[in-house]
Image: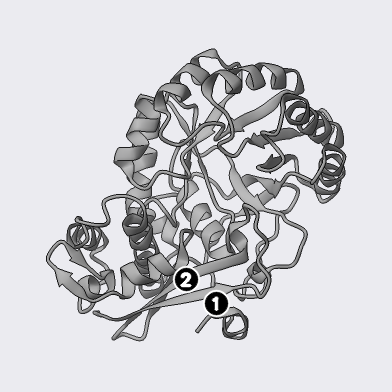
């Protein structure tokens, strides 16, 4: 079997709000083979930059479009192809966009392997730790603390036992920050888990103050309160905070995750398969986390392709904690571009058992949102 094509599909809603919602557009990757087997992947990044990194031509031996690097190769050779892509783009792609772009291709290659062998990806990864995984409803904060309370009630009524709120208006002032958390807890009740994503808004001392103030609300974790590169700040916060500190979605391969774990001393390692280098790299990052006694959760605020991939990944590692599951109430392209629609049941998601990823694109939905 040989790779015969790599196609990037940029999808975008007609109206995109200026807010931290990466589900308003999507960059999908399709890899085709001469055996008629097609794999799909996703990249959550700057879509057009990723498209250029994949579709671009050969420039020289250390700056090459990734499509050029994998055409004609055997899709089963995922480890070899990961390193070939990395080496072929090492000048421009050791972090960030280059690794993000590799993620989509790597995910599609694992989808191909599973389909060709008639096995779900998690079996190829040696998994089987779970039949289902607990998930949390992931949402932006309401516009006000009271709106956040109302959202929390609705998510609880839908059966979620864990809910995360994040980003704006967190970070405006201490009173607003604390009231957002207070009202989130009020709406959710005392017997469900409340997770808070601060959205990179504080310095270390402010984050320590907020962590102490949030302690009375018994939050499950405090996510990304600091700039991603502030490892010393993360260390100070982690050592001073009574709360779990979670981070990782901004990291792009295991070397940057090592800094976050060893210098930043975080408690929960958040891995996004569409950014970190795909399944091939994610498994190594999870192993490094396990060696350090750290739990792993996914990050995914985009499409069901991302979430489905995360389920395969998390059931293949011994240190999986919980699954992020976007529960935004507005209808988005997420609901229209795949044939399968993921639904939580009593706060849990089932592990896919179909060959490959077990999720297929809906051509009509893709064409509706595709940007030519």
Q: Position of residue 350 (x, y in %)?
A: 62, 55
Q: Cα distance, mark 1 to mark 2?
A: 10 Å
Furthest residue in direction front, as rendered? 172
Query: What residue is at 42 percent from the left and 54 percent from the top?
Result: 275
The N terminus: image quadrant: bottom left
**Residue 304 sits above or below residue 131 on the image:** below
Residue 55 or residue 286, whichever sits in front = 55
Whether the residues at callouts 1 and 2 have beta carbons within 8 Å, the answer is yes
Question: Count of labels shown?
Answer: 2
Q: Which mark is residue 361?
A: 1
**Residue 245 sits above or below residue 370 on the image:** above
Q: Is residue 56 left or right of residue 290?
A: left
Q: Which mark is residue 230?
A: none
**Residue 41 sits above or below residue 274 on the image:** below
Mark earlier in primary sequence (1, 2):
2
Furthest residue in direction left, as rendered? 61
Mark 2 lies on residue: 28
Query: What residue is at 58 percent from the left and 63 percent from the top?
Result: 303
Helix or strand or loop: what does disc 1 sit on? loop
Q: Position of residue 95 (x, y in %)?
A: 31, 49
| Residue 88 appearing in the image | yes
Q: Is residue 28 left or right of residue 331?
A: left
In the rendered view, how is the structure colored?
Answer: one colour
Query: What residue is at 32 percent from the left and 67 percent from the top?
Result: 53
Query: What residue is at 19 percent from the left and 56 percent from the top?
Result: 91
Q: Position of residue 327 (x, y in %)?
A: 71, 54
Residue 218 or residue 2, whichever sits in front = 218
Q: Position of residue 261 (x, y in %)?
A: 39, 29
| Residue 74 appearing in the image | no
Residues packed near mark 1 inside 10 Å, few (<14), some (14 to 19) or many (20 plus): some
Furthest residue in direction top, as rendered? 240
């Amino acid at each position: 079997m040989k790779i015969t094509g790599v196609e990037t599909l940029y999808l975008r809603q007609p109206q995109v709000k200026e807010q931290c919602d990466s589900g308003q557009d999507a960059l999908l990757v399709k890899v085709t083979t001469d055996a008629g087997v097609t794999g799909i992947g996703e990249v959550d990044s700057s879509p057009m930059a990723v498209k250029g990194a994949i579709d671009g031509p050969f420039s020289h031996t250390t700056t090459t479009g990734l499509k050029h690097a994998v055409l004609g190769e055997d899709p089963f050779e995922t480890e070899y192809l990961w390193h070939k892509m990395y080496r072929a783009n090492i000048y421009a792609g050791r972090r960030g966009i280059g690794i993000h772009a590799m993620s989509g291709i790597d995910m599609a290659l694992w989808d191909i392997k599973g389909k060709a062998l008639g096995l779900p990806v998690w079996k190829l990864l040696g998994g089987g730790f779970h039949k289902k995984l607990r998930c949390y409803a992931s949402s932006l904060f309401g516009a006000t603390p009271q709106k956040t309370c109302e959202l929390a009630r609705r998510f609880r009524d839908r059966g979620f036992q864990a809910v995360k709120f994040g980003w704006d208006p967190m970070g405006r002032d201490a009173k607003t920050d604390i009231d957002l958390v207070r009202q989130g807890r009020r709406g959710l009740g005392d017997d469900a888990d409340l997770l808070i994503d601060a959205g990179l808004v504080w310095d270390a001392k402010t984050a320590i103050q907020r962590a102490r103030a949030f302690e009375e609300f018994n939050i499950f974790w405090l996510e990304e309160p600091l700039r991603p590169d502030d490892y010393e700040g993360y260390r100070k916060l982690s050592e001073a905070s009574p709360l779990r500190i979670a981070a990782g979605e901004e990291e792009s391969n295991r070397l940057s995750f090592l800094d976050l774990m060893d210098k930043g001393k975080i408690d929960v390692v958040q891995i996004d398969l569409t950014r970190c280098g795909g399944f091939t790299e994610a498994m190594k990052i999870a192993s490094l986390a396990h060696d350090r006694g750290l739990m792993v959760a996914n990050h995914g605020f985009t499409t069901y392709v991302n979430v489905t991939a995360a389920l395969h990944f998390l059931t293949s590692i011994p240190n999986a904690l919980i699954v992020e599951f976007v529960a935004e109430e507005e209808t988005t392209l997420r609901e229209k571009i795949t044939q399968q629609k993921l639904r939580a049941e009593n706060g849990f998601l089932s592990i896919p058992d179909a060959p490959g990823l077990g999720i297929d694109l809906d051509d009509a939905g893709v064409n509706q949102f595709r940007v030519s």
